[in-house]
Each structure stands twice: as C-alpha cells, then as structure tokens.
Image (tube, rainbow, N blue to C red):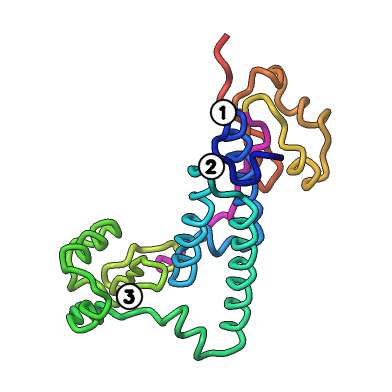
Amino acid sequence: MDFFKSQESLTATGWILRSIVGFVFLIVAAKFMGQRSISQLRFLDFIIALTLGNIIAHPLSDEHLGLKGSMITTVSLVILYILAIWISLKIPLIKQFFDPPAITLIQEGKLDYRNLTKAKLPIEFLFAELRKANVDDISKVAFAAWEPGGTLSVFMNTAFQPITPTDLKLSTEPFNLTKPIIADGHIEHALLREIGKDREWLEAEIRPRVLKDIILATIDSNQSVQVQVVREP
C-alpha cells in the first residue's frame, strides 16, 4: 500500500495501482451521486464535476501527494452535494438558485433579445440550435426556451407541426417496443426472465440458426423474435 501514500518517487506499478484505485473510487463516487450528475450538468453539477476532477487528478500525477487526503475530500464533497440537492428539494428559494427556471427566448415567432442577453447567448448560437431542431424560420416557432441544463427547447406553431394519425382520425397499431435479446452471440438473460421464457424457447425461435452465429436478434412486445444480423460464414 506504499503507492497510497506520498512518495519521493513511484514505480510504474505504483502509478498503475494508484490510477486503478482513483478510477474505481471516482466510479463509486459518481454512482453514489446518482444519474442527475451524469445525464446533465447544471450549475451545482458543473461545480462538483470541476472540483472532483481537480482533487483526484493531482495525486494521480504527483507522487508527493497521497491518495488518502484526496479521497477524504472527495467523500466530503459528495456528501455536501447530496445534502445540497436534498435541501433544494425542501426549500424553493434554494432550488431556484441551483436550478433557475428556463429563460424564454422566442415567443410567438418573436425574439426576446433581453432574455437572450440574460442567457449570455449570441444570436448565431441560437440559430445554430434552431437548425439542430430542424427549424428554418424563427417566425414558425411558438415557444423556445433556454433550459438550465444548457439545451434549447423548441415548440413549433400548430400550423407547422407534422400531421399525426390522430389529426386525420386514422386508426393505428399499438406501440410495439423491440429490445435486443441476443447480442454478439450472448443471450440477455434478464430480458428472457422478464418475459417468462427460457433458453430452450429462444433457441427454438431462432432455428435453423445457432446462437453463436447471431450478432443481433430482437424481440418485440408480442414476444416475436427477429434475427437482425448473422455472422458471415
């Protein structure tokens, strides 16, 4: 455990072990903080990501620093992060500070330049985001807002929205979700248990093909198995 403490110099093995410990520790810390800190970087998430990255990076590149202090600091910050999230859920004022409301940028086809300045966004960036949303004319936008997570939400005027079967009063088939049940020759056993089937049933469904030759097979809500990609002989 010498690699864990500060050293005058570390061997190649020591650096590798320190990297492994730091990597696993960050994974555990991120898992403990939850999906929110991974899926989107809001104000509090951005601060904690920068801080944790700097804290754990130094002992991974400087042999004179031990891992113990960095790990204790990281655990403390993770606890503070979770506490701040909990407090923000209980106190609306704190929640508004950490997660401010979305900033309206376009209303009924008209740009709100004051809010654009408030969001600190150049017009060119706004139009780039509109192009990503397949918007070719700002006058067609009913409402657009800059979300706290750094994304643009866009809603088109009803006259420019795609026509749906409901608009035409057409009957439609029920939603049918397909999921991979075989991936690269390996069975997704959790999915197989979920639908109440076993390996023998699946092998019967894919015959005459054999399991090891199938790269991808999917199953839908009606428990119909479709072999999508087969390994070339």
Q: Mark 2 to mark 3: distance in Å?
A: 48 Å
Q: Is residue 30 visible?
A: no
Q: Residue furthest front?
A: 8
Please name the residue shown 18% across and 70% down the image.
138
Please name the residue shown 58% across and 76% down the image.
85
Q: Is residue 161 left or right of residue 9?
A: left
Q: Nearer the viewer, mark 2 or mark 3?
A: 2
Q: Which mark is residue 12?
A: 1
Neighbours of disc 1 within 10 Å: few (<14), some (14-19), many (20+): few
Q: Earlier in the sequence, mark 2 or mark 1?
A: 1
Task: Find residue 181 and report its horizontal and vertical position in percent.
Answer: 68, 36
Q: Earlier in the sequence, mark 2 or mark 3?
A: 2
Q: Which mark is residue 63?
A: 2
Q: Quadrant of the C terminus?
A: top right
Q: Mark 2 to mark 1: distance in Å?
A: 11 Å
| Rendered position, 197 above or below 137 | above
Q: Which residues are magenta?
A: 167-183
Q: Earlier in the sequence, mark 3 or mark 1?
A: 1
Q: Are marks 2 and 1 in contact (CB under 8 Å)?
A: no
Could you tell me which secondary element the residue under label 2 belongs to?
Answer: loop
Q: Are marks 2 and 3 in contact (CB under 8 Å)?
A: no
**Figure quadrant of residue 127:** bottom left
Q: Amino acid at mark 1?
A: Ala
Please name the residue shown 20% across and 78% down the image.
117
Q: Amino acid at mark 3?
A: Ala
Q: Quadrant of the N terminus?
A: top right
Identify the residue position indicated by label 3 in the image. Answer: 145
In magenta segment, residue 178: yes
Q: Is residue 6 visible?
A: yes
Task: Find residue 12 and report its horizontal and vertical position in percent.
Answer: 56, 28
Q: Which mark is residue 168?
A: none
Neighbours of disc 2 within 10 Å: few (<14), some (14-19), many (20+): many
